Image: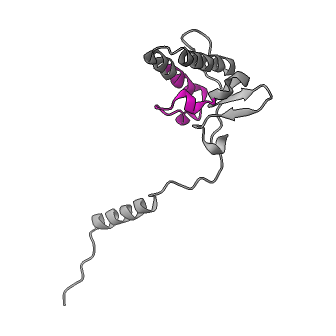
Amino acid sequence: MPHPTLPSPALAATAAALAALAGCRDAPADDGACRCTPENRSRTQLPEGGTLDGATLLAKLRRHKRDVALQRPGRDVKLFDDELRLELTGFCQPCSDWVKDRLTIEDMFPLDRLDDAVAGVCMGLVLRDGTTVYGNARPRACR
């Protein structure tokens, strides 16, 4: 009588790996819990001296808005925005993965509320009344 053949160990391992990957196809469900709290301060020296804090961030956001309103050359605005995005990776630690390469300043901050702001925080603004409003790019659970 023929002897049944058993799968090779390599084939069994491959099948197990494929089954595990199939189980991980979808991202975990958002349970509504924020898993990160930004420090809202930078430890890196800015080229102009000092470090990025809430007041400095607010001034930079106002400059961005002014440069756009004055229709400064797009390249100049982009360069300024790229530098600010890089500075935000330090400011938002340990949540720097929120600051994606292609995010615009408008996605990260609610610039329509800039006139009411007294300070900037990671992807948000602290308003005169003490409330904080956040940009659309900040994870919903962390707003």
Q: Position of residue 31 (x, y in %)?
A: 63, 54
Asked if 121 appears above or below 50 in the picture, the reply is below
Q: Position of residue 130 (x, y in %)?
A: 79, 29
* Residue 19 location, quadrant: bottom left
Front residue of 49 and 119: 119
Q: Residue at x 43, y 17 (%)?
A: 75
Asked if 4 appears above or below 45 in the picture, the reply is below
Q: Residue at x 41, y 59 (%)?
A: 21
| Residue 8 drawn in magenta | no
Q: Residue at x 80, y 28 (%)?
A: 129
Front residue of 74 and 103: 74
Q: Is residue 82 left or right of residue 60?
A: left
| Residue 85 drawn in magenta | yes
Name the residue at the top extreme.
48
Residue 35 shows in this picture: no
Q: Which residues are magenta?
A: 83-110
Q: Residue at x 59, y 53 (%)?
A: 30
Q: Position of residue 121 (x, y in %)?
A: 66, 28
Name the residue at the right extreme.
129
Front residue of 19 and 65: 65
Q: Position of residue 14 (x, y in %)?
A: 32, 62
Quadrant placement of the N terminus: bottom left
Residue 94 shows in this picture: yes
